[in-house]
Image (spheres, rainbow, N blue to C red):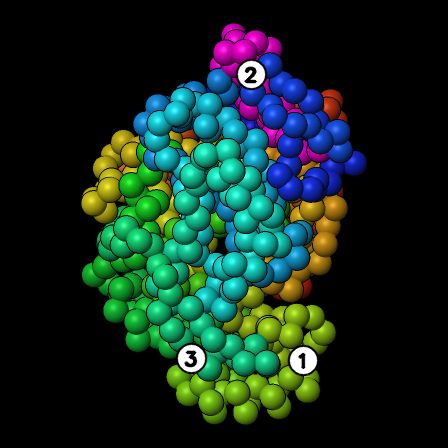
């Protein structure tokens, strides 16, 4: 089952209205009302059937598809993609959560707990995200039924931005009510191979001091949500999207939201490859000067605001909140196919998710059950995750291994999965393997032939990840 991925495709697939009731009364559920226009619910249900979940009981009242992933009394965390208060094509929609919650409740059988948790970008409006996605309406619906579902914003810190999208100050966020755990991967980190360049590690909008405190030659530490580590099962609900630094953001990349402090997350290395960097492809005095200048200015928010206004005159179109200047747009801050840092951080976090116990100690056996359900009803292409454009894909994808799920998603997007490092560079051996067996999964789908969607990559990736 770990190597199997299921795919549901319908060109008419679209998001229904809250509370996202199913279009028919399924025998295994006590359905209170139906919505004849909701194809999404049945699509998710079909994903579970295709995966063979509780196959002997399918079609009857006792069918319990998530019974092998969720046990009575478990704490189950649903991890959507709530990156920012963006349109529905860029964040996980509540209609995909609805069937997952219903079948989780059936598996819990009146006990246990469901938590929806994520850490959006620091400038994101969490309540607005819940409204746009329909998750607020969904949680209110369950509350009326007497079912309590916690919704947790995992950010320790929230950024206040001005009208130009520049961070002017940072304030304390609500954070994980359970707190955080420091997990050190040490030499087992995917970053270990580039540890000699640790002083070059950077992440957008943060200065380097905090970063190199936690990532250097001796250690590779991550600040992980205790809500995540306390979970008995994780149901990952990513979005089908392109990404300017990683190529794609799917099941693997979505787990970046389990961290409590973005300044602990290496996203790129300042400079060009000949100098140990991966910020841009070739050595350039101009780019080096720009990079060093921005690196300094971001430690001086008010000064950076003034400079940013000048840069905005040269900026390409798109979201106002972005900080891209036209002259550095294509490869700024590691936004290109040669980024050799961000994929390492992504795989580190997935290693922690699967192998860290509740205290942050790494074990050689997996510590929690895992399922991914990818929302590709409406998807995102071009310069994601923020400046993306709508792609109507009509897809839902599921599986119990994030690497296999990402492989199939990337293939359906028209990309070559083996040209995307978050997928192709996973370890299938050693103490903490993320993959068992072949990297290419077995696939079952509702249609004999699922059309390839031919997504347009982020600008820095065009010509480098498409299927040849």
Indicate the quadrant containing the C terminus: top left, top right, bottom left or bottom right.
top right
Residue 304 in the image, given as x and y percentages of width and height:
49, 87
Left or right, 95 with respect to 201, comes to right
Q: Residue at x 50, y 59 (%)?
A: 126
Q: Nearer the viewer, residue 399 or 111?
A: 111
Q: Quadrant of residue 295?
A: bottom left
Q: Disc 2 designates what residue?
A: 28
Mark 1 or 2: the one toward you: 2
| Mark earlier in primary sequence (3, 2) | 2
Q: Which residues are magenta?
A: 38-63
Left or right, 297 with respect to 7, comes to left
Q: In the drawing, what numbered circle is on residue 315?
A: 1
Residue 2 visible to an observer of this rendering: no
Residue 226 visible to an observer of this rendering: yes
Q: Residue at x 48, y 18 (%)?
A: 64
| Mark earlier in primary sequence (1, 3) | 3
Q: Nearer the viewer, residue 18 or 120?
A: 18
């Amino acid at each position: 089952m770990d190597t199997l991925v299921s795919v549901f495709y319908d060109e008419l697939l679209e998001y229904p209205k809250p509370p996202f009731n199913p279009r028919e009364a399924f025998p295994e559920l006590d359905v209170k009302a139906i919505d004849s226009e909701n194809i999404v619910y049945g699509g998710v249900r079909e994903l579970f059937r295709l995966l063979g979940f509780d196959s002997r009981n399918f079609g009857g009242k006792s069918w319990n598809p998530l019974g092998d992933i969720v046990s009575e009394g478990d704490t189950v965390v649903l991890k959507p993609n709530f990156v920012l208060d963006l349109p529905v094509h860029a964040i996980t929609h509540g209609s995909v959560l609805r069937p997952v919650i219903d079948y989780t409740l059936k598996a819990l059988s009146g006990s246990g707990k469901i938590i929806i948790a994520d850490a959006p970008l620091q400038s994101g409006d969490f309540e607005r995200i819940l409204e746009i996605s329909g998750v607020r309406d969904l949680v209110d619906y369950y509350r009326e039924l007497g079912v309590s579902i916690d919704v947790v914003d995992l950010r320790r810190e929230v950024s206040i931005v001005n009208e130009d999208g520049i961070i002017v100050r940072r304030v304390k966020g609500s954070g994980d009510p359970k707190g955080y755990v420091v997990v050190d991967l040490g030499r087992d980190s995917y970053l270990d191979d580039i540890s000699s360049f640790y002083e070059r590690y950077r992440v957008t909008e943060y200065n380097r001091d905090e970063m190199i405190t936690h990532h250097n030659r001796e250690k590779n530490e991550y600040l992980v949500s205790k809500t995540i580590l306390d979970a008995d099962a994780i149901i990952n609900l990513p979005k089908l999207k392109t990404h300017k630094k990683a190529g794609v953001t799917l099941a693997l990349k979505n787990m970046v939201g389990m961290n409590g402090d973005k300044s602990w997350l290496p996203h790129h290395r300042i400079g060009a490859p000949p100098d140990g960097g991966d910020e841009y492809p070739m050595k350039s005095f101009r780019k080096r000067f720009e990079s060093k200048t921005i690196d300094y200015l971001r430690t001086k928010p008010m000064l950076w605001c003034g400079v940013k206004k000048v840069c905005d005159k040269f900026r390409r179109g798109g979201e106002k909140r972005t900080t891209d200047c036209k002259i550095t747009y294509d490869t700024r801050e590691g936004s290109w196919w040669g980024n050799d840092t961000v994929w390492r951080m992504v795989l580190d976090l997935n290693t922690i998710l699967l192998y860290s116990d509740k205290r942050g100690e790494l074990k050689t056996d997996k510590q929690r059950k895992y399922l991914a359900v990818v929302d590709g009803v409406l998807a995102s292409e071009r310069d994601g995750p923020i400046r993306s454009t709508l792609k109507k894909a009509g897809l839902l994808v599921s599986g119990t291994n994030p690497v296999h799920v990402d492989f199939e998603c990337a293939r359906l997007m028209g990309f070559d999965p083996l040209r995307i490092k978050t997928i192709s560079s996973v370890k299938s051996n050693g103490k903490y393997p993320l993959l068992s067996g072949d990297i290419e999964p077995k696939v079952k789908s509702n249609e004999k032939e699922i059309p390839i969607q031919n997504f347009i990559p982020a600008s820095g990736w065009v010509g480098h990840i498409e299927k040849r």
